[in-house]
Image (cartoon, rainbow, N blue to C red):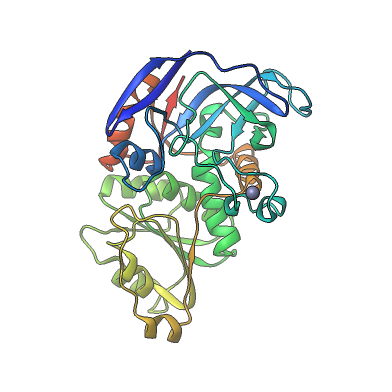
């Protein structure tokens, strides 16, 4: 079967590998149909000195497909069912796993597509407990954006920042995969959304998606505009994933007692923190990574209710690297999906 493997930094090869073995006990076999790209793919592609992994490695961290075969003891799935996959190999037995906090598993064996073989291959076997059904009416291309992009946003906004209807939120990089999802999810519950973008064309698209205010961070200091827009009060929540370039301004954009939730540092990992400001303004800074299986189900339910991921581009498996380069160039608006 075909599998797309990372053989060296920035070098992908389409390989013909031996087909997956039959689904084992408590496993299902999935025919992969769509893989969505994320910044984690880009980190892996560029090469990460600290990542414990062996090359060649099958890439692809977020995907959707159809059940191809069912192992002994598995109930609740039948051949042909559309599904998405939880891409971290959790143990299923520790206290975090048992309480549904899958992304805090104490014995996680790696993130698929990053530490261990991922989803960019025709067939993959997984424990059935890591496989989530796709509700009727949701396209696999859309569903492929649920396990990482949509579920991460779900976890950030609702589990971590506890965003409530009527609040004001600043969403950074409103044209990114998670930015477009955050704008839509916050609008859906009746929040006021301010977003930052890097060019005016993306600004128009972000407005069409529901953003109330768009700030071009290349021409304006976003923290100044946010204070103006909120009558100097600041926002209730900042949705961070840009990191070094924006973190200080993000804190200045918060109101007293506001919450900053972050899941990324695409512009760099280091920022300074004024501790006086932190405690006097009573900020809450919350780190967020990944999502729970429940978040993925909730994201899929929202898709079924009409929330569609913004798809920037669809590319074939052979063009996976071109998709990554497009993501890296920041020319994207929404998600890049690779179809098999
Ligand atoms: Zn666990």
**Residue 197, x across and y down, in percent:** 31, 53
- Is 301 left or right of 228, judged from the image as shown? right
In the figure, 113 relative to 33: above or below? below
**Residue 276, x across and y down, in percent:** 38, 86
Q: Nearer the viewer, residue 179 or 35?
A: 35
Q: Nearer the viewer, residue 217 or 80?
A: 80
Q: Residue at x 68, y 27 (%)?
A: 27
Q: Quadrant of residue 305?
A: top right
In the figure, 70 relative to 217: above or below? above
Q: Quadrant of residue 322?
A: top left
Q: Residue at x 44, y 48 (%)?
A: 178
Residue 331 visible from this viewpoint: no
Q: Quadrant of residue 303?
A: top right
**Residue 54, x across and y down, in percent:** 40, 34
The count of marks equals 0
In the figure, 262 relative to 36: above or below? below
Residue 120 visible from this viewpoint: yes
In the figure, 294 relative to 36: above or below? below
**Residue 110, x across and y down, in percent:** 51, 42
Q: Residue at x 49, y 44 (%)?
A: 149
Q: Nearer the viewer, residue 57 or 12?
A: 57
- Is 260 left or right of 98, judged from the image as shown? left
- Is 267 left or right of 186, judged from the image as shown? left
């Amino acid at each position: 079967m075909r599998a797309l493997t990372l053989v060296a930094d920035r070098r992908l090869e389409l390989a013909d590998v031996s087909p997956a073995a039959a689904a084992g006990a408590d496993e299902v076999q999935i025919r992969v149909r769509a893989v969505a790209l994320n910044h984690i793919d880009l980190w892996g592609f560029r090469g990460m000195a600290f990542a414990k992994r062996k090359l060649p490695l099958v890439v692809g961290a977020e995907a959707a497909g159809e059940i191809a075969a069912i192992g002994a003891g598995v109930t609740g799935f039948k051949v042909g069912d559309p599904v998405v996959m939880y891409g971290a190999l959790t143990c299923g037995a520790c206290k975090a796993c048992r309480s549904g906090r899958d992304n805090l598993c104490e014995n996680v064996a790696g993130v698929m597509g990053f530490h261990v073989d991922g989803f960019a291959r025709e067939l993959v076997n997984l424990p059935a407990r890591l496989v989530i059904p796709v509700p009727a009416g949701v396209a696999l291309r859309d569903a492929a954006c649920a396990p990482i992009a949509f579920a991460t946003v779900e976890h950030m906004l609702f589990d971590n920042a506890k965003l409530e209807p009527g609040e004001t939120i600043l969403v950074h990089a409103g044209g990114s995969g998670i930015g477009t999802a955050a704008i839509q999810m916050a609008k859906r519950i009746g929040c006021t959304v301010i977003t930052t973008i890097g060019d005016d064309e993306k600004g128009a698209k972000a407005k069409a998606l529901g953003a109330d205010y768009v700030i071009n961070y290349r021409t304006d200091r976003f923290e100044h505009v946010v204070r103006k827009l909120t009558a100097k009060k600041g926002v209730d929540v900042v949705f961070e994933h840009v990191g070094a370039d924006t973190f200080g301004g993000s804190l200045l954009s918060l109101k007293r007692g506001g919450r900053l939730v972050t899941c990324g540092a695409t512009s760099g990992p280091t920022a300074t923190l004024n501790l006086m400001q932190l405690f006097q303004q009573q900020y809450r800074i919350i780190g967020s990574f990944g999502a729970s299986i429940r978040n993925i189900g909730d994201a899929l339910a929202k898709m079924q209710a009409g929330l569609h991921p913004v798809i920037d581009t669809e590319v074939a498996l052979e063009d996976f690297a071109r998709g990554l380069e497009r993501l890296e160039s920041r020319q994207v608006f929404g998600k890049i999906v690779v179809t098999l």
